[in-house]
Image (cartoon, rainbow, N blue to C red):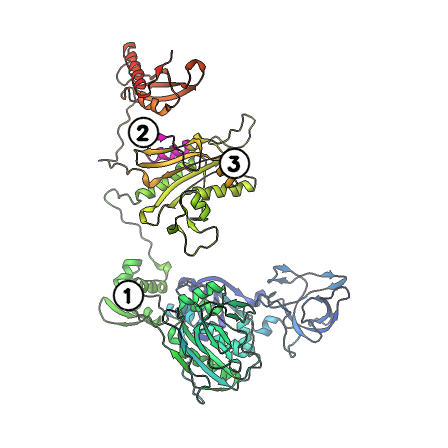
Amino acid sequence: MKFTLDWLQDHLDTDASADEIGKTLTLVGLELESMEDQGKALSAFVTAHIVSAEQHPNADKLRVCKVDAGTGELIDVVCGAPNARTGLKSVFAFPGTYIPGKDMTIGKGNIRGQVSNGMLCSNAELELSEDHDGIIELPEDTPVGMKYVDYAGINGVVFDISITPNRGDATGVYGIARDLAAFGLGTLKSTDMSPVPSKGPSPIAPLPQLFSGDEPKTIRKFGGRYIKGVKNGPSPAWLQQRLRAVGLRPINAIVDITNLVSLGWGRPLHAYDADKIVGQPVLRNARAGETLDALDNKVYPLDETMTVIADDQGPLCLGGIMGGLRSGSTDETVNVFMECASWDPELVARTGRKTGIVSDARYRLERNVDPALTEPGLELATRLVMELCGGEPMEPAISGEDVFANSVVEFPLAEVRRLTGLSVEPMIVTAILSRLGFEMSGKGETLTVKVPSWRPDVTQKADLVEEVMRMVGVDNIPVEPLPRLNHVAQRMLTTIQNRRRIARRALAARGLDEAVTWSFISHEEASRFGGGQETLQLANAIASDMTDMRPSLLPGLLAAVRRNGNRGSNDLALFEVGQVFLSDAPEGQHTYASGVRSGTARLDGSGRHWSGKAEAVGVFDAKADLAAVLDALGIDIEKVQVLAEPPAWSHPGRGGRIALGPKVTLGWFGELHPAWIDALDLTGPVAAFEIDLDALPEPRKKATKTKPALDLSPLMPLSRDFAFVVDKAVTAGAILRAARGADKALIRDVNVFDVFEGAHVGEGKKSVAIEVTLQPMEKTLTDEEIDKVSAAIVGAVTKASGGVLRT
C-alpha cells in the first residue's frame, strides 16, 4: 500500500516529519517497507521538447530526434517509442543519469550508426507506473528544461507499508491517518460524505438480485447512481500527480476519481458508461460458457460461482474484481452509472484465485471493507464527479442489505496488564479505544465495548488488548526476568518433541544433512510406498504431482537424491524428521525419522581417495544409522528383534525390520531394490532406513533422576573365542543372544568376528565365530571358573541354535 505525505496530510493534521511518521507506522502495526523521496530519486530528469523526429535510416522502428532540454543546444537522441514525434513535450535523461526502471545508467552511444546522447523516458522507466508503451506525453504549454519532479509535483515522500490480511481498514489513507491520530501524532480530519441532492428519478432502477437459494452470493448490497451530462476527459493535474506518485496511471477524470476514493478511503468503486448498458442491469451469478472482456484487455472464462453485474448482452463487470471493457468509461462518456457495493470477502477472494486477477478492488474487498461506507462512499464519489466533471446526479439505486458484525466485547481492563505486562491507566485505555472508533459503556474494572464497522477482525478481549498495546507501543513492554523457582522446573517438552530433537542430533552427528521436504507427493509415489488411499488425497491440490499426503518420508528424500544426482552430486547423506500420514484419523499421523545414503556417502567419508578403495553404501550403513538413533533414544538394538523381513522398497535379503514383540514395529532398513532405483530414476546404490518414533515405548519413570555411582572393576577383562557350526538358516543374532544369556553377571560383551562357509564344514552349514568378553568384578577368575562359563556358553548356543562347537 503506497501513499504520499501530502495525501496523508489531507486526512491528518500533523506537524510530524516524514521520518517520525515512518517510525510510527511500524510501531502501530503498519510495517514500513520503504520510504522514498521522489524528488531526490528523480531530480536528474527534465522536461524537454522534441523539435524534430525523423525516421532512422537503418531501422524501421527507431527515430532520430532533435531534443531541446533547456541547455541552449539541440541534443541528438535515438528513440524507439511509437509515440515519439515532432512537437511532443516529454521527459529527458542526460547521459550519466540512473534509470530506476531499468536499473542502469544511461550513457552516450551509437545506435545503428546514429549518435544518441541521452534518453526520452516512459513512466515505467521512472517507476511511476507500469506503462511502458511509449514515452511520457506532457501538455503543450509545459516549460522546457524544468525538473520533472517540480513540474509534476511528485517531489514528495512516498511511503510503502505492508498490511496484514485482517486490516482492511488500513487499505485507505484515511484509515492509516486514524491509526496515527490515535497514536497521538496528529488530529484526524473529517470528510464530507453527506447526501448529494438528486435532480430526479434514476433511469436505472435498483438492481434486482437474481440468485437461487443454493448459489454462492458474493454481493451483499449494491449502490448505484446515475449522473448525466458529465464532461469527462483528463483529470486535474493534482489528481494525476497523486496517482502517478503511488504507481497508478491516470486514465480519465471519472476513472481517476474511483481510484482516488479507493486509495483514499479504502472504498473500491466502478464507473460504467451508462449509454453502453443494454436494458436493465441485474446482479446474478455467471452462466457456464460466459466470458468477460476485462479492462486489462484480457478475456476471462467465468463459472456459476462468480457474481457478475450483467445487462441484456451479458456480464458488464466481475463483481468485486474488475470491470468490463465494453461498458468502461472513456473520454467520450457523457452519462455515468457509479457503483459502490458491499461484497462477501471470502467469495471475492475465491473468485480472484480462480481467475488469477490481482486488482486493487480485490486487494481491498477480500480484506473486509467497511460496509457502513457503501452509501457514503457513493455520495463522496458523486460529489467529486460534480466538482471535476459537472453533471446532474439522479436518485441512488440501492438494493440488498449490508452485513455488519456488530461485535460487543466484555473487556476487563486488567487484561492489558495480564497479557502484555503494560501498566496503562484506565483513562488512557478508554482514550485510545475511543480514538480508534470503539464505543464503550459501563463503569468499574470491566467495560462493554462496541466494535466499529470497519474492524470486523476484533471479536474478543485479547484483540482489544492488542489495540491498546500497539498504541502504547510494543517497544514499551517491560523486559522482566522470569521469577526464580524454588524447585526444579518440570519438563517442558513432550516425549515426541524430545525424540525429534534427539533423533536430529544423532543423525547430524553421523554426517547426514537434514532435509525438509513436502508433505504432499504424487499419487503414484504414495501408492508405491504404501499409501494412496482416497481419504489421504487432497481436495484442492496445489500441483499435479502433490495430490496425496505422504505415507513415508523416503519419497521426498529420494527425490532430493535424484535432483542432486542429476546435477552431478551422487554421494549424498540426507535425513528428515517429520510427519507421515497412514490414515485420516488422528492416530494415523505418525512422526518418522528417516535417512538415505547414496553412492559412497558412508560414515567415514565419501568419494575416491588414494588411501583406499571407495566402498559403496550398503545395508549395514543404514542399519548402523538406525541403531545410532535408537541408542540415542535409549533403545538398545541388541535387546530388540532384528528380523530378516525387508520392507517392500528393499532389495531381497538386504534389508530387515526392527520389532519389539510380534505386534510393534520400530523401523525398517535396507538397500533400495534395483527395480525401484530404475523406476525412481536414481543412480547407484542407495541405503535407507525409517524409524517410527511414535512406536517407541514410553521411557520408564524413575524415582530419581540422579545418576548411580560409577562402578568400575579394578580387574582386567579377558576374552574367549568360540566357533560354532550351525545351519545356514540360523541367524547370528540368535547365537549372540544365547551366548550373552549364559552368565549375565560375568559376560560383558559378545561379538561376531568371523563367518565361514565351505565344503569341510558340511553341506548347508556355516561356521560362526564369536568373541566373548568376561569382566570379573570381585576377584580374578580361576581356570575352573573360566571353564565353567565356557561350558555354559557352549551349552546355551547349542540349545538355541542346534549347532556344535567347531574343533
Q: Which residue is drawn at 44% across and 41% down?
A: 554
Marks 2 and 3, how far apart in space? 32 Å
Q: Give the range drawn in magenta.
A: 623-647
Q: In which quarter of the image is residue 746?
A: top left
Q: Which amino acid does label 2 sit on?
A: Lys
Closer to us: 716 or 508:
508
Left or right of 608 on screen, residue 476: left
* Residue 630 covered by magenta stretch: yes
Secondary structure under badge 1? loop
Residue 190 seen: no
| Mark 2 / mark 3, whichever is N-terminal | 3
Residue beneath disc 2: 639
Residue 245 seen: yes
Q: Which residue is drawn at 33% across and 54% down?
A: 479
Quadrant the C terminus occupies: top left
679 vs 342: above or below: above
Marks 3 and 1, how far apart in space? 64 Å
Which disc is residue 610 wearing? none
Residue most extreme to the front: 763
Mark 3 or 1: the one toward you: 3
Residue beneath disc 3: 571
Left or right of 201 on screen, residue 590: left
Closer to us: 638 or 154:
638
321 vs 523: above or below: below
Residue beneath disc 1: 425
Q: Residues within 10 Å of mark 3 (few under 14, many from 20)?
A: many
**Residue 433, position in %: x, y?**
32, 69
Mark 1 or 2: the one toward you: 2
**Residue 530, position in %: x, y?**
40, 43
